[in-house]
Amino acid sequence: RRLPKRGMKIFSKVGRKKHVYQIVNLDDLLKLKAQKINSEILFKQGIIKKKDIPIKILGRGEFDKKMEMSFNMFSKSAIEKIEKAGGKVIFI
């Protein structure tokens, strides 16, 4: 009878590396008073826990502030809401 080798890993359908993002919604960003927002500002405010993990902005909630945001990923609805409010989206 054959036995499997030790240490065998099962990979998901997406591939070998799973992309992990910290999720932030637009309604969480309404509390901030800064015009330019990046990961350092979110870390200082306590919205995210780690600086080195990429951040994805989702479009939950209403958004009406003019802000310049620079993050790794944005959802389509978040981009529409930010640009509609007069803000700017920058991909890192």
Image: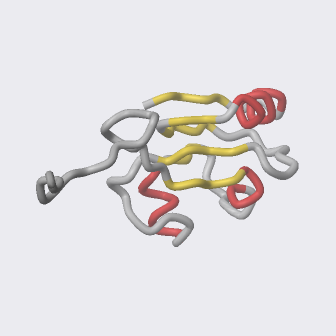
In the picture as drawn, the residue positioned furthest to the bottom comes out as 46
Question: Residue 3 location, x and y as percent?
Answer: 15, 56
Q: How is the image coloured?
A: secondary structure
In the picture as drawn, the residue positioned furthest to the front comes out as 1
Judged left or right of residue 67, residue 77 is right
Quarter of the view holding residue 30 = bottom right
Query: Where, quadrant-wise, is the C terminus in this rendering?
Result: top left
Quarter of the view holding residue 29 = bottom right
The residue drawn where x is 47% and y is 37% is 72
Question: Residue 24 location, x and y as percent?
Answer: 62, 55
Question: Residue 27 location, x and y as percent?
Answer: 77, 56
Question: In front here: 92 or 85?
Answer: 92
Question: In front here: 65 or 60?
Answer: 60
The residue drawn where x is 14% and y is 52% is 2
The residue drawn where x is 55% and y is 47% is 37
Judged left or right of residue 88, residue 22 is left
The residue drawn where x is 66% and y is 60% is 32
Question: Residue 91 location, x and y as percent?
Answer: 49, 28
Q: Is residue 80 above or below residue 3?
A: above
* Numbered-mark total: 0
Query: Where, quadrant-wise, is the N terminus in this rendering?
Result: bottom left
Question: In front here: 47 or 9?
Answer: 9
